[in-house]
C-alpha cells in the first residue's frame, strides 16, 4: 500500500515539475514573441515612416469603407501566398 502511495507521490511530483517547466517555456516564448513584434514594428516604422498602429488604423478604415474590395484583396493575397508556399 505504501509503495502505491510512493509511486503516486512520485508521479504527482513529476507532473508538477513538468508543469513548472512548461510554464517557464511558455513564458520564454511569449517574451521572444514580444521582442520580435517590437523589432518588426521598429523596422516597419523605419522603412515606411509609419507605425504599425497607423497601418492597422488605415486598414481598418479601408475595410469599413470597402468591405468587398477588402475581401477580394484578402482572397488574392491568400491565393498568392498559398502558391508561393506550395
Image: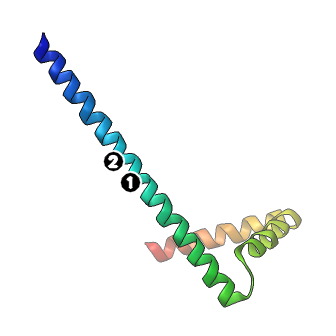
- The residue under the point 47% across, 66% down is 32
41 or 13: nearer the viewer: 13
Above or below, comparing residue 19 to residue 53 in the picture: above
Q: For mark 2, what is the residue? A: 21
Residue 73, given in percent of the width and then of the height, sits at: 71, 71
Q: Label 1 crowding class (10 Å Cα cut-off): few <14, some 14-19, many 20+?
A: few
Q: Which residue is label 1 attached to?
A: 25
Left of 67 or right of it: where is 79?
left
Write the residue at 10% across / 17% down: 3
Residue extending farthest to the top is: 1
Q: Quadrant of residue 40?
A: bottom right
Determine whether label 2 and label 1 are within 8 Å by CB.
yes
Rendered view: 72 above or below 29 = below
Q: Residue at x 52, y 72 (%)?
A: 36
Image spot of residue 72 (x, y percent): 73, 68
Percent coordinates x, y for residue 86 in the rendering: 43, 72
Q: Residue 24 vs residue 63: left or right?
A: left
Amino acid at each position: 500500500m505504501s509503495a502505491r502511495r510512493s509511486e503516486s507521490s512520485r508521479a504527482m511530483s513529476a507532473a508538477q515539475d513538468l508543469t513548472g517547466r512548461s510554464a517557464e517555456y511558455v513564458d520564454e516564448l511569449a517574451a521572444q514573441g514580444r521582442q520580435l513584434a517590437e523589432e518588426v514594428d521598429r523596422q516597419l516604422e523605419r522603412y515606411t515612416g509609419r507605425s504599425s498602429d497607423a497601418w492597422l488604423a488605415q486598414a481598418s478604415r479601408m475595410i469599413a469603407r470597402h468591405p468587398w474590395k477588402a475581401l477580394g484583396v484578402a482572397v488574392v493575397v491568400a491565393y498568392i501566398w498559398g502558391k508561393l508556399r506550395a
